[in-house]
Amino acid sequence: MLSAGSSRYRKFFDSPPAMVATALLIRLAVLAVAERTPGSTWWVVINALDLREVGAVARSVATGEGFNWAGPTAFVAPGFIWLLALLFKVFGVDTMAARIAAVCLNALFSSATCWTIFHIANRSFGHRVAVGSGWVWAFYGSAVTAIISLNDAVLTTSLFSFLFFVTLGLGRQVEAHPWRWAGYGILWGAVGLFNPALLPLLPFFLAWLWWRLRRLGRSRDSGIFIAALASILVVTPWLIPIILCSIDLCPFGRLSGYSSIGATILGR
């Protein structure tokens, strides 16, 4: 029989919230030490980071000029730009406070990935593998250092892991409500707005869900079509001006009128 102390330790070790909290503490601690160590690689990145196109477009959105980087642009996806522009509005455009807030937000998203990794592994391989996987991510060096990169990589990883978790859940629901399928499609669209490179995976995920639900005895395919339609509706407002411009249906200079969606949302 386990002692009371061993039982508490085991309960902590098996807890996904404990993994998330530990991961967050590690990332914030490393960030705090690095920020107070002038000359370190992290210190240089945080204090002298050139945000290049991401920062330039976010500054443009935050100041109400739309998606512009030496002219109207669709070079970067809008999701992370809107998020960074919101931080610029709250903490000041391209200030140290805004950069620290962005890095801390990265740390939060990176830590939250422990939760989805645990539940994905728990559904696929069992509890023991899930516990090990969650703790490995909490202490994984590359996951810790990635938070200083002010791009969509950390947030995309977190969103995609959650998307994978939701996909596994839908694959077990023979009669999921249409709103669940719509939410699934909206989640895919949101991921696409942060990183369009993941959208080609959508047909394969939907095909797997169709195959999985057929094996469970579901005969209707309406949920698959609802999810696909919802994802298309989410990304369409961003794709329309790009398509119009690419086939020369509008002068390139007029694209700014369409591509200022982010600035409008943030209160241009």
Image: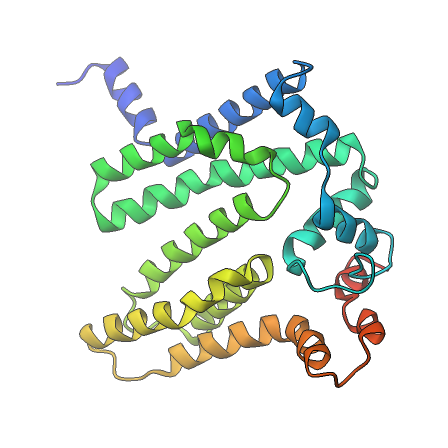
Image quarter of the N terminus: top left
Q: Quadrant of the C terminus?
A: bottom right
Residue nearest the observer in this picture, 59 or 23: 59
Question: Depth check: 99 or 109 in front?
Answer: 99
For residue 37, above or below residue 153:
above
Residue 232 image position (x, y, % from top left): 54, 76
Which quarter of the figure has residue 68?
Answer: bottom right
Quarter where residue 219 is shown: bottom left
For the point 53% across and 35% down, which residue is it?
Answer: 146
Question: Which residue: 30% across, 19% down?
Answer: 9
Location of residue 178 in the rendering, given as x and y in whole percent from the top left corner: 43, 76
Establish if 219 lies above or below 176: below
Who's the residue at 27% across and 64% down the image?
A: 172
Answer left or right for 253 relative to 124: right
Q: Position of residue 70 (x, y in %)?
A: 82, 57
Task: Please state which of residues 23 and 51 is positioned toward the viewer in this rendering.
Answer: 51
Where residue 117 sits in the image (x, y, percent)?
36, 43
Q: Is residue 258 above or below residue 62?
A: below
Residue 76, by quadrant, is bottom right
Among all residues in the image, which is located at the extreme left?
Answer: 1
- Name the side, left or right, on which 62 lies relative to 210: right
Q: Residue at x 73, y 38 (%)?
A: 50
How many marks on residues?
0
**Camera-side residue of 46 and 213:** 46
Question: In the figure, 109 relative to 191: above or below?
Answer: above
